[in-house]
Image: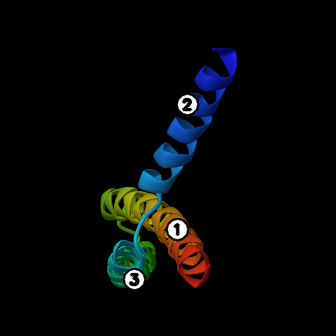
Amino acid sequence: MKKIVCIAGALALVAGTALAQKTHAEKDSEVRQDRKEVKQDRRAVRADRHEVRQDRRDVRNAERRDDKKGEATARRDLDKSEAKLRRDKQELRKDTQELREDQRQLRQ
């Protein structure tokens, strides 16, 4: 009786892992989706870098004009832009890592 239960359990385990595996088309779809996310993240990072450069320019111009209030506003904007850039860079790294993992699984 114990042998039958043991064999039935082993068969259930094997069947469960076979059903849990993804097909080649599903893996390929995930890779495409990850590539799209990475591309969007790169665009966001590029836009954020542009925004940071513009904010730095604004800070320099305010310093040159000796405008304390404008300088403080520009620095706040710069801090927000840099924080957004850091978040987008982290997201890009995470999505790039997921893409590499999915590509590795696709090759297997």
Q: Are marks 3 and 2 in contact (CB under 8 Å)?
A: no
Image quarter of residue 81 = bottom left
Separation (CA) of disc 3 from disc 1: 9 Å
Which of the marked residues, 3 or 2, is nearer the chain's N terminus?
Answer: 2
- In the depicted structure, whether residue 78 falls above or below residue 1: below
Q: Which residue carries the number 2 mark? A: 8
Q: Which residue carries the number 1 mark? A: 98
Q: Which quadrant is the N terminus positioned in?
A: top right
Q: Which quadrant is the C terminus positioned in?
A: bottom right
Q: Which residue carries the number 3 mark? A: 35
Q: Residue at x 58, y 71 (%)?
A: 101
Q: Amino acid at mark 1?
A: Glu
- Determine whether the residue tagged by mark 1 lies in a helix, strand or loop: helix
- Determine whether the residue tagged by mark 3 lies in a helix, strand or loop: helix
- Determine whether the residue tagged by mark 2 lies in a helix, strand or loop: helix
Report whether 101 appears left or right of 46. Answer: right
**Residue 63, image x, y percentages:** 45, 73
**Residue 42, image x, y percentages:** 41, 83
Image quarter of residue 7 = top right
Question: 10 Å neighbourhood of mark 3: few (<14), some, or many (≥20)?
Answer: some
Question: 10 Å neighbourhood of mark 1: few (<14), some, or many (≥20)?
Answer: some
Q: How many marks?
A: 3
Which of the marked residues, 1 or 2, is nearer the chain's N terminus?
Answer: 2
Q: Amino acid at mark 2?
A: Ala
- In the depicted structure, whether residue 90 falls above or below residue 6: below
Q: Residue furthest top?
A: 1
Circle nearer the viewer, 1 or 2: 2
